[in-house]
Amino acid sequence: MGLDSQQLVNAEGVSLTVEQALANLQQTDDPGLRYYAAWWLGRFRVTQPEAIDTLVSALDDETDRAPDGGYPLRRNAARALGKLGERRVVPALMRCLDCSDYYVRESAAQALGQLADPQAIPALRALLAGGVAAAVPTPGKPHLVQPYNAVLEALGSLNATEAVEDIAPFLNHEVAQVQNAAARAMYQLTGETAYCDHLLQRLQAPNLQLRRSAMMDLGAIGYLPAAQPIATTLAENSLKLIALQGILESHLQHIGFPASGLSTEAKQVLSLMDDLL
Amino acid sequence: MAGKGLADISTLVQAIETADSKAAIVVAVRNLAAANDPAAISTLINVLGYNNPGAAVAAVDGLVSLGSIAVPALLEELDGYNYGARAWAIRALALIGDPRALPVLLDTALGDFALSVRRAAAKGIGTINWSQLPEDQVAQAQAQVMEVLQQTTTDPEWVVRYAAVAGLHALVLKAVDSSFGAVISQHLQQVISHDRSLTVQARAQMALNALSGDLG
């Protein structure tokens, strides 16, 4: 289905055209309009060359600065580029991994994972330098020195088997979400289901955030045996449905749906989803 | 069926009010829900607004197991809810399936701002207990439901379209007008070939299989 004009509307009901979004991103007087335009181009999958070029330029923006010195526009531009599927932006995103702004590095790592270009692997691995010993909190900030979750997940998505030895120690990092990200990547890189068992156990964690993150990880890697435990964990149905969608679609692609028809497993996941509506 | 009596209910309600953690609230709400007593209805409805998913699930379970008797209170307070609470209340109404909730569920499926609310409503209008409606009103109400569900299969959110397909599946099994089968089959075919979500396509395929008598 193409772009439906009815859908090109933001939460306040303000609609943009592609031309307006590009013009908003190219001007520099109103940082709010630029920030929104960058998000909008990603959300509505505007892949025309001018959109890509303008977003790449925004990765070097110096005008939109947060009080803490961060680069809000760069963050949004990197996220948008991750959604647009153009691999020619990979070198520009790799340079963002050296940005002083943690959130730019995080968005760039996520985008590189989505773009599935293995040339990003060495630059991503570099952020794991020093291993778990170096992976400590940034003083005065609510995050670690590097966006480890995003880096580990990207390496898993990129099938970076050469990084297994860098990743494995993070299974024992003191932050539970980092352990989850490492388990997710290790499963993708080795196919060992023991790593998924770690995530399945997390579905019973007393902390809701941990259950949510384990659910999303299991959905993202499409681990079919997790469908039932996800359906019964204590969390919002909206998130369970998204995780089950991830599991179902991996399975459907694996069996070759629609040509294949539905398997017994697919019907079971659909029944679980029906009960969560 | 017999409740535990008012004295017990007020003790159970008090346990919710004095619970000192989110987990303790969940346990207290479960206990109140398990009493299955109409005197618990207003407290269970209040719990929907606590922003505590575990407690809300327990409260919805309790309201659903009380069934139709909880419907007037749920409908009455619907407008005063925040979005979170409204979503849970619509979910309760959708699961109870009382036709008195049909007008509000129809409006909600088409027009609510929150996608989780549209999702619950779309499923709910397909699973109304038609036997609770006077027989001469069923055909017209079902026609209205079918029209709204067909429209809802074009919602921008995949999960709402999914719920609409599940709703159509449930509706066709209870349809009094035998022409619904052909209309819904044709609509499901369209969903399978045009919907951009693989999950929605799969749900439509499952409904279509059931309609063609292929239950395996």
Image (cartoon, rainbow, N blue to C red):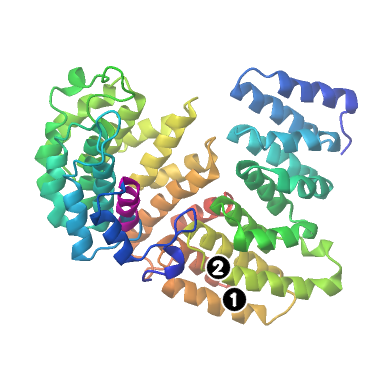
* Tag 1–tag 2 contact (CB < 8 Å): yes
- Give the quadrant of residue B97: bottom right
Mark 1 or mark 2: which comes first in sequence?
A: 1
Could you say which disc has been placed on residue B207 in the image?
2
Residue B6 lies left or right of residue B59; in this view the side is right
Q: Secondary structure at mark 2?
A: helix
Q: What residue is disc 1 on?
A: B184
Q: Secondary structure at mark 1?
A: helix
Q: Quadrant of the N terminus of chain A?
A: bottom left
Where B183 falls versus B125 (above or below)? below
Residue at position x 72%, y 71% in the image: B142
Residue A78 lies left or right of residue A243; in this view the side is left
Disc 1: host chain: B
Q: Are marks 1 and 2 on the same chain?
A: yes
Disc 2: host chain: B
Residue at position x 69%, y 59% in the image: B105
Where B83 falls versus A143 (above or below)? below
Residue A116 in sight here: no
Where A141 falls versus A123 (above or below)? above
Does residue A255 belong to the magenta stretch?
Answer: no
* Residue B10, image x, y percentages: 84, 24
Residue at position x 54%, y 53% in the image: B115
* Residue A101, image x, y percentages: 22, 33
Where B19 falls versus B46 (above or below)? above
Look at the magenta stretch and give its main secondary structure. helix
Residue at position x 38%, y 62% in the image: A16
- At label 1, the amino acid type is Ile
- The residue segment tinted magenta is A31-41
Does residue A39 belong to the magenta stretch?
Answer: yes
Residue A78 in sight here: yes
